[in-house]
Image: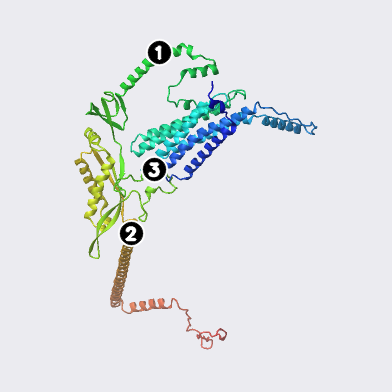
Amino acid sequence: MTSPNETNFEASPSALLLPGTVFAAVALVLFLSALLDGSSTPALDRLLYQLSAMLLVIGAGFLTASVTEAARRRGPFERREFSRRRAKLPSQRLQRLRAFHDKVRSDLANIDWQGDWYPILVAALPSALALRALYLAWNIAGPNPSAAFDEWVAASLIIAAFPVLVAERFLAQHSGQRAPEASSLARLIRVPILGLLALGIATGLRWLHIPWWTLIEHFADIVVGLVAAELLLRSFVHVFVPLAPIETRVSHADSLIAGLIHLQLPDLNAFNAVISERFGIDLARSWALAFVRRAALPVLLTMAAFSWLLTGVTALGLDQRAVYEAFGRPQTVFGPGLHVHLPWPFGLLRPVEYGTVHEVPIVFAANGSAETAAVSGSEEGTIEGPPPPSADRLWNAEHPSEAGYLVASVSNGKQNFEVADIDLRIVYRVGFTDQAARDVVYNVASPETMVRAAAGRMLARYFAKYSISDVLGQNREAFIHGFERELQARLAALDTGIEVMAVVVEAIHPPPAAAASYQGVQAAAIRAQIAIAGARASATFQMTDAQITAIRARNEAAAAAAERVDTAKAATALFAGDRQAYATAGQAFLFERRIEHLDTGLSKMPLIIVDHRIKRDDALTLDLRPFYNPALQ
């Protein structure tokens, strides 16, 4: 016997198409809003993606049910036949081409698009888009929103779940012959109910600063993703399975996972009835299932006990170690390898790093709390591409890995303060000894925060003792070694178990606003040094040139004097020889010397010899005057 409400309710294509279209349109608006927002508010974008995925799932169910209901009302699909006047074509090839065209036309015209393919498309496309929205929502990370945002969102989501619950109850009451898809739609509509409640609870826990909210939010995303994946799989399988007659065909947009979202235990008899109806298998008469039902409780208890005992077996990797506590008291430190100990909660392991090296920049936020600089190994770049942001060392740009400190200075004979930015990084690790592991576990809540706080105090005290000129012009190596020793001593005095490996100073410079002025001062100093060096080089060149000229003049004078002395000595020796020869030979020497001089003097002159035996009458007249040619004048 049916209720009056069920008798009066009859699903129609328009009644199902309208809510399906509204759900799909709202889901697309939410999806595009989150996609075009540019992650300005990560929490809001994640929520919009999650809501769009829920609405896409229920929209796919309503649209598929609407198309199937319209095909069922239409009745069986009537095949169409095409006939044409068989005019004889002149070519055999044209006849085959026309036959192929007629066959393709007939096949396309006889495809039941409304009953066979439209339900698949309207179920598969929204499901695939829902999976994409959940993937984008899962990968969004960012800071938590304000408390007011969480408060309003949590209340809105929980309130929005009640109208959806009313719609689910309405569809569940009217499932029957007049509305075959009402039961499947009632199951699908449980997905947004669960999603809205889970997201509302997760947002409320985030508002209360309870860390479990992420697990609840991920659970809701996983459930919606499984239902969307099931719809997509059902659409794919629907292409290959034989379809029921159109008079009894129902929408394939159903979900077994959504059917499990129920306050009652699953009805195995109903599941058995479905299996018997579709596959002809009676699971109630299966001895294997009866044996499984009898042995399920002992097996589950045994597996639970075995799983509990397995909590007493721990395998640590090569970069891991742990402090072992038995009944709340530390016993020893386990190194890498397999260890057997008391199971939980009697025995606990507190993991400790083993050899992992960390690099922490000394940066502080505006509110005084430490923040991690944007320095990570995930920066990708190529050799020929632009450099990553961490490689920027320009003074006139702000860097997220730098901190500003007040430094004493003197200007116009008066004490003053200036600001210097420093990019300093501490490379540290947890000590290898067991005592260091215990100290880190029980004395330090956050090693990174401890190192940053200790180094920040030391830097503030250091910059308070020196002036800006000392800071910018000091010996960097001496500062690094001294700072490293002092920081290690401070951490050891606090029993932190942290070992400082290195102190890296990337840059020390004025703040970006004063960078241009300070660069101008530095440029003037550099230009002055360049001018001094140039003057010194010019003086050195001129002095060297003068020395070269003096040395050359002295050497030339010495050479000329030596040549003249040698010439005089040679003339003296020749004169002494001539005197000795004259004393010995007398006129013979003089005659010989005269002949020698004549020979030398006349060797280059033309000679005319006049013989004395020529008679006076035959004598020649020789004109020894130079020849004169007026034409050459």
Q: Which residue is mark 2?
A: 514
Which residue of the protein is positioned furthest toward the front in this rendering?
4
Task: Give the residue type that dot 2 points to.
Answer: Ala
Screen quadrant of the N terminus: top right
Depicted 464 relative to depicted 81: above or below: below
Q: Quadrant of residue 75?
A: top right
Q: Which residue is mark 3?
A: 149
Answer whether labels 3 and 2 touch (C-beta < 8 Å): no
Q: CA distance from mark 1 to mark 3?
A: 52 Å
- Sequence-wise, the earlier of marks 3 and 2 is 3
Q: Position of residue 234 (x, y in %)?
A: 53, 27
Q: Quadrant of residue 554?
A: bottom left
Give 561 or 206, whichever is nearer the viewer: 206
Q: Which mark is residue 294?
A: 1
Q: CA distance from mark 2 to mark 1?
A: 82 Å
The number of numbered badges drawn on the structure is 3
- Within 10 Å of disc 1 (Cα), the crowding (few <14, some 14-19, many 20+) is few
Q: Position of residue 205 (x, y in %)?
A: 36, 36
Task: Give the residue type that dot 3 points to.
Answer: Phe
Q: Which mark is residue 187?
A: none
The answer to whether residue 272 of the structure is visible from this angle is yes
- Within 10 Å of disc 3 (Cα), the crowding (few <14, some 14-19, many 20+) is some
Task: Give the residue type that dot 1 points to.
Answer: Arg
